[in-house]
Image (spheres, rainbow, N blue to C red):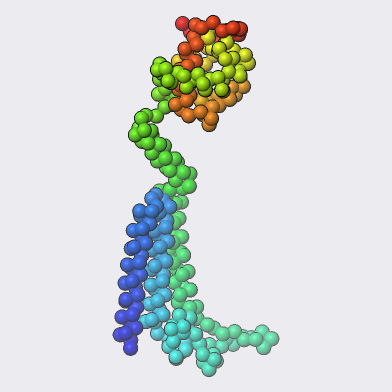
Amino acid sequence: MKVIKKLKAVAIIFLLFIFNNTMLAQTSTASEGGTGTVIKMIIAIVAVLVAIVLWFALVGKNKSGEQGGSSKGSWWSSMNYDTSIEDEQSILLDHDFDGIKELNNKIPPWYNVIFIGTIVFAIIYGFRYHWSFDGDYQVYEYNQEMAEANAAKKELAKKSGGIIDENTAKILTDDASLSEGKDVFIKNCAACHANDGGGLVGPNLTDKYWIHGNKITDLFKTIKYGVAAKGMPTWQKQLSPKQIEEVASYILTLQGTTPANPKAAEGDLYE
């Protein structure tokens, strides 16, 4: 009978080992970085604790005299060191309070295993995240994920024909792009700069004076981020990078034209 119990315990521990490795493998593919490491630690510790508890349950012996255990030797008794009512006198403490006496019950093995397990986990966790400073804190995880997202964004932009921003914008000269730029200008910019670019609330876009530069990259940046101090809104949420590049290119075509009611020059002269 003892051999069968031991075989059962070994079989269960083996199955837990397989389950533990399977879960760790799935965690490795599903989660990377510090979070994945913590999950692996938790799974491993839980598996070990369950194995130890089951070992106590299937192989552990009740010592009725030494530990106050029940002589029945049931699974539940092995887990809890139960004492039968008939044997309670052997673990009865001497002191009492108003006729109430206390039993000197032994702490169940599963409780001790979990308690020790929490201490081990706390030491490992504390060493990794607070003493060695090697762990991935939330801010580090956030920065890492943002870096990965930006890298993925750039890679996607490369595959789709390149990324367009204030550093890579180029002057477009084809009729289709300039036509699209003009449409965007009339719908969104003319209210402040007039349909012909002569300027209303916003500055004149037809002369050689510019407040924030006259390069395509300067215009792209101004349109994208806006100029809050001058009442210029940001358009990066309303217009795509391609549309900003198109409207910036169209604005440059207004240079040297004659608007109906040009506004006085503002900014610096760019020849």
Look at the image and tell me in which quarter the N terminus lies. bottom left
Q: Percent x, y for residue 8?
A: 33, 80
Q: Nearer the viewer, residue 248 or 60?
A: 248
Q: Nearer the viewer, residue 195 or 108?
A: 195
Residue 54 is left or right of residue 105, and the answer is left
Relative height, residue 155 to residue 52 (above, below): above
Number of numbered discs present? 0
Q: Percent x, y for residue 27?
A: 38, 57
Relative height, residue 101 to residue 210 (above, below): below
Task: Identify which residue is drawn at 46% across, 84% down.
Answer: 77
Relative height, residue 52 to residue 187 (above, below): below
Task: Identify which residue is drawn at 42% across, 20% down.
Answer: 176
Residue 5 is left or right of residue 201, and the answer is left
Task: Identify which residue is drawn at 56% across, 22% down.
Answer: 187
Judge whether residue 67 can be spotted in this image: no
Q: Nearer the viewer, residue 74 or 113?
A: 74
Q: Percent x, y for residue 226?
A: 55, 24
Q: Percent x, y for residue 174?
A: 40, 17
Task: Identify which residue is drawn at 44% across, 40% down.
Answer: 146
Quadrant of res 20: bottom left
